[in-house]
Every structure is written in C-alpha cells, then in structure tokens.
Amino acid sequence: MGFFNDSFRERVRAASDIVDVIGSYVPLKRAGGNFVGLCPFHKEKSPSFNVSPSRQIFHCFGCHAGGDVFKFVQQFENVNFPEAIERLAERARIPLERDENPAAAQVRGLKDHLLKLHEAICQRWQQCLASEPAGEIARTYLAKRGVSADAIREFRIGAAPEAWDDTVGWLQRHGFDKALGEQAGLIIRKPETGREYDRFRGRLMFPICDEQGRVIAFSGRILQGDEKIAKYVNSPETPIFTKGRVLFALDKAKRAILDAGHAVICEGQLDTIACHTAGVRNVVAPQGTALTADHARILKRYVNEVVLCFDGDKAGRAASVRSLDECLPSGLAVKVASIPPPDDPDSYLRQHGADAFREILGRAQGFFDYYLAQLTAENDLGSDRGRLAVVRAMADKVNRTGNAVLIDTYAQRTATRLGVTAEAVRTEFRKQVPAAPRPVRAPAPAPAPAPPRIDNADAALDAAADEAATESAGGPLPTAPEDYVEPREMSRPGQPELWLLKFLLLADHDLLAWAAAHLDCTWIAHETIRNVVGLRLAQAGSDRAAELGPLLEQLSQDPFAVQLVTEAAMEQRAVAELATQLSEATLRLRNLWIDRQLSILTGQLMDVALPDERRIEVMQQQLQLRAWKKTPLAELGGF
C-alpha cells in the first residue's frame, strides 16, 4: 500500500467533520460548545466521551482515549492509519491518491482490478441465486437449511451455474481479461491445451470479505454430484487473499466482538451465518477448521479471549485441541463450548433455539479443563498406560504456556482426576520438555515514549509546582478517575505545565505568535510537555495554527502525548481571558525555572572545594537570576 501525501490527507480531514463521523457510530448530544456521549472504547453509564467541533478532536475523561477523526476510525474499526484515511475518503467520495513507486503502483493497480472483478462476479452469482433457473437447486438447499432471505442478502450468498464455461463467457462479455480471471482463481487454464474452464461449477457461493467488507475470495459448497467431489472448493491465494489471514464474517462481527469482549469461532460458513441470524453476532470462522497464528493475532487486536465452538464430533474436538497451539503465542485466552454430538452450531440452533445455544456458550470451559475432560474420557484410567497418556498430554499442552500458576493448577487437577498425588504429577510435568510456541508474525511495536528526565532540578520543580498548584490560573485541572491506570510514561507533569499546554492549545494565531517569541521550551521540565509545546510553537507561523490534526499526527507514536493534548484542548475559553492566563502561566514557568537554577547554584556554593574564582561567578549568576525574576514579561515585549 502506498502512502497518502499531506495534501490528500488534509483534503480528507477537511471533508470529514468529526461530529458527523463519530455521530454515525456513537449517539452524541450537544453540551455547550462540545458534544458528549457514552464512550465506545470502555463501558460506562454516564457519558465522559467528548467531541469538540471547533478543534476537531475527541477525548474520553474516563479511559483517556483521544485524537482526531483519523484516530477515531483507527481505534473504532481496528485498522491502520492508511486504511482509516481510505475509509474516510470513500465516505467523503474523494478519489484515492497515493504516493507510490512504479512497482508499488503496479501491485496496487492489480489489487484494485482484482477487487473490482470479485465484486462484479459476486453480484453475478447473487443474481443467479435470486432469479435464474440455474439457481433453483441452491434456493431449495438454502430453504431446507433454514437460511433466511435476510441472511442471504446480508452475506451476499450466490450460486454458480453447473457449466464449464459460464464464468469464462461472463468475463468476455463484461470486458474482464481472462488472464485476470485466472489470477483471481475464478478460471483454470489447462497447460496441455490452453483451454480455460470455471473453477466454481454447480456450487453454493459464499463471498469471503476482508475487514472492510470487500469481496476478496469465495468458498463454494457442492450441492449435488459424486461423493468423490470435494464438498468445498475455495479460491486459491491471490494478491488480495491469504487463506490463513482471513476470518469469515469478521467484517460483520467485529463490533459485536468488541462489545461482547470475546470472539466465538465456528467451523464453517453456514454455522457462522446461523449464529448471526440467531442474534449471536460475535462469531467468525476460519477457512475450514484450521485456525492459524495469524488468525489469532488478528483477533487479539479486538479481544483477549476466544470461545471455540466447533462441531461436536471427533474431528471438531481434534480441531479445538489443535487451535490452542495457534492461540498461545498471541496471548489469547481460550475456552471451548461443547455442542452435543452429532450436532453442529447450525443444526443445534435450528432444533433448540438461540437461548439454548447462548447457554452452551455461557458454560464454555477453560481450554485445559476441557482438554482434561477429553483425555480422561478417551483413555483407560484403570491402566498405567492410560493414566500416563493423560499426564503426558496435559504436560505437553500446559507447559507450552510457560505460566507457573497454570502449570501447578492443572498438575493438581490432573492428579485429582487420576487419584494420585499432586507432587507425582508435578514431577512428571517437569520431565516433559515444552515445545517452544511458534512466534507470531506481527509488526514491530512502536518505540515507547522516553521517560521524563529525573534530576535535582526536576525535583526542585516538582516541589515548586506543588506549592503553586492551588494558585494556578483558572483552578485545578479535572482529576483522573480512581480506576485510571497511568500510562507507561510514569509521571504526569505539574499543574503549571499542564495549564501552559492548555492555554497554548487554545491559543489563536496572535497568542501563539506571542508565546513563540517569549516562551523558552527549556523552562519546561517534563519531557513530553516540552516536546509537545515545541511542536505547537512551530505552528505559530502557519495559517492553520488553530488546527490540532497535524499536531496529533506528529505525536501519533506517543499515546501519552496524544492523551495530554486532547484532554487539555477540550475546554473552551474566551480569547481575552486566555491572553492574561497565557502570560501568567508563561511567567510562572519562567520563575519556577529560575528557582531551579538558583537551587542548583546554591548547592554549588556549599562545596568547600569550589575555587574562589568560580564561587564569584556563581554568586554573580545568582544576582542576575534574582534580578530577572523581578522583571515582568510585559517589559520583555508582553501584551
């Protein structure tokens, strides 16, 4: 994917009013100059989520999420920055413009053509199912399976005619190159003859979508024919489809997954569709029963727990056990919901209803409890061989976690089930060499923001800031809730620095220009505040000084800085009042800095080994600093 240049990003930002965008996801009500609502990023009963139309930012005073319109889409949709821009551009009907090198542009062009082709053939197969004679068998099958018309429309189910060249002919009639159809996996070319024929023939067609809801592949289920024919045929991997990285229905389930706090993983498309139809919408499926480490990594972006709900037969139980190995490296907690055999989720829902199915999900066992129950059912506990098989299998799985508490817990539970001592099982567990979990292919994490510098001068400032906090212009800042967990930065700035940041973020062009002329960033001890103020003062000469979006983009790799900016900028103040407060805050910080320097110099004078020449220099510096402290900013060119 190429990059979007600054001009394009700003066009998209200008066309994406933050109140309109967030209001399409979250109900908002006006509260003074801002809008408020219940935060979509944590559960709350009283609204603490604020949206500022004038600053085009949002901030939650409960969980401290904050940012601009791009950041909101990133967090709500769980997408990266370019994808957020792309979605907002599509919403505003702005054609995409990327900065790409020729090779990247060629790849992007191919992907765009493949997406267009997949969308078009999806519509063709939908039409076939809906009204053509070739779709009659598929319509009958869906009616028999109890798939509703609403579900057919939502999941865009279609039917591929029983013909060798239906898609081949369709490509030619609609101006698609057959080579593109071959790259998409829709048609196959025989090497020996060069003849093309359809991959999908006489099948019920399930579109497979990416997280944005774009059709990228298909899964076709056979409706009639020889038992030797594969029950399902899937698209091959293409530039837009990698089987092990796509979860069926994630585009429709992701909001429900976030709300529920866990994802339910079923075995196939019809099971997943049945769950969604029954109102259990936090359900997805891998392509087949094989859950991969990439699937687990994708789900970990949304939640910390998954519930496996595969078929109740032996193959389904085996798939549940295999899935643990893929989930462990991602850090996902795993539970297993047991469907009574011979049912699968689809048949169980049709026979017993949604409430009974939800009860099964609610009774889902932790993976190791489920696995222990399976092992004790499948092995003869009356024999040494059976008991040893249980211990070894449990050791192999539990040891993979590397968690001493889990290992000891399940050593005790295994001992209880086998009627032996816990210490004996612990000993056997220790004998088993755990297989190293396979690493998850994940992007390198962004570097953590550097901690603030701590030295004697900082300590002096902290003490002075605490003294001055009650005198701060405008009163104290809002306090964080009791359950708030401090970010990794470890240290919040003192009140004078926070107020200075607030005033600078609210400042108009003229006030910002004054601050740039009279404020020295070295007066600010807290590193994050100092960095933010430096970036803000650099906007002084810009016509867009009142806009915070570009500033937040520059701070995107520092979540703590973004939090401070959105929190500080959410308040509204009159410019006339703000001018006086900015001047006073600047003067206060200057004087606190002077106090710090005086404290350092006093410490130097206490050194009996200090040479006389240096002692005189230090005393002169003290006199100069004290004189400077008595000089008001107005005499230095203030308001």
Image (cartoon, rainbow, N blue to C red):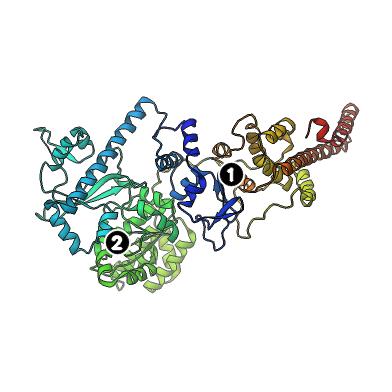
Badge 2 amino acid: Phe
User: In which image quadrant can residue 402 be found?
Assistant: bottom left
Q: Is residue 561 above or below residue 130?
A: above
Quickly name the residue at label 2.
Answer: 310
Q: Nearer the viewer, mark 2 or mark 1?
A: 1
Of the numbered discs 2 and 1, the one sitting upstream in the chain is: 1
Residue 141 located left or right of residue 576: left
Residue 352 visible in the picture = yes
Residue 21 located left or right of residue 219: right
Q: Position of residue 611 (x, y in %)?
A: 88, 29
User: In which image quadrant can residue 562 be found?
Assistant: top right
> Mark 2–mark 1 contact, CB under 8 Å?
no
Nearest the viewer among 599 and 609 is: 599
Quadrant assignment for the C terminus: top right
Q: Position of residue 93 (x, y in %)?
A: 39, 39
Dot 1 alpha-carbon crowd within 10 angstroms: few under 14, some 14 to 19, many 20 or more: some
Q: Position of residue 192 (x, y in %)?
A: 9, 33
Dot 2 alpha-carbon crowd within 10 angstroms: few under 14, some 14 to 19, many 20 or more: many
Q: Give the CA separation, mark 2 to mark 1.
A: 50 Å
Q: Is residue 487 above or below residue 627?
A: below
Nearest the viewer among 568 and 338 is: 568
Residue 54 located left or right of residue 146: right
Residue 67 located left or right of residue 86: right
Badge 1 amino acid: Ser
Which secondary structure lies at badge 2?
A: loop
Quadrant assignment for the N terminus: top left
Q: Position of residue 212 (x, y in %)?
A: 36, 46
Residue 230 visible in the picture = no
Quickly name the residue at label 1.
Answer: 54
Which secondary structure lies at badge 1?
A: loop
